[in-house]
Image (cartoon, helix red, strand yellow):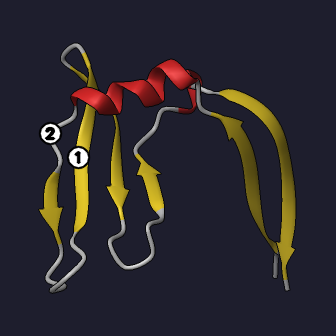
Amino acid sequence: WEPQVIRYQLVEIPVDLLALMQRAKFRPVGKRKGRQSLGADVFRGKEKVFHVHFDGSDGKCQIRDLNIRDCVMLETWDSLIS
């Protein structure tokens, strides 16, 4: 049996990359009534650089599909799963 490891990465997303959200076409997502969640693909020219999701229930922002090469790596660490 091999112990399993989770690798964590703390990255800084450049502000100019986040600023691309200003041009994104946000659309309602989910089925919740009331405070609607919004999501959008974010592009730099014709290249999709990430997807952003704003959760209507708690206001949290999630970014996915972001290429790590576009970010500054601040720290990495491993955690063993027991």
Residue 39 lies, in percent from the top left, at 24, 55
Quarter of the rendering occupied by the C terminus: bottom right
Residue under numbered circle 2: 25
Q: Are marks 2 and 1 in contact (CB under 8 Å)?
A: yes
Q: Is residue 73 left or right of residue 57?
A: right
> Would you identify the image quadrant in which residue 5 lies?
bottom right
Give the amino acid at mark 2: Lys
Q: CA distance from mark 2 to mark 1?
A: 6 Å
Residue at the spot x=59%, y=32% of the render? Answer: 13
Residue 60 lies, in percent from the top left, at 48, 65
Residue 40's disc number: 1
Above or below, 49 relative to 29:
above
Quarter of the rendering occupied by the N terminus: bottom right
Counting other residues with Cα less than 10 Å from the Cα at mark 1, is it few (<14), some (14-19), or many (20 or more)?
some
Give the farthest residue toward the top.
45
Above or below, 67 relative to 55:
above
State how many labels appear: 2
Residue at the spot x=45%, y=76% of the render? Answer: 58
Residue 24 lies, in percent from the top left, at 22, 34
Query: Regarding mark 1 in the picture, which secondary structure is present there?
Result: strand
Residue at the spot x=61%, y=27% of the render? Answer: 71
Circle nearer the N terminus (2, 1)? 2
Give the amino acid at mark 1: Ala
Q: Is residue 61 left or right of residue 8?
A: left
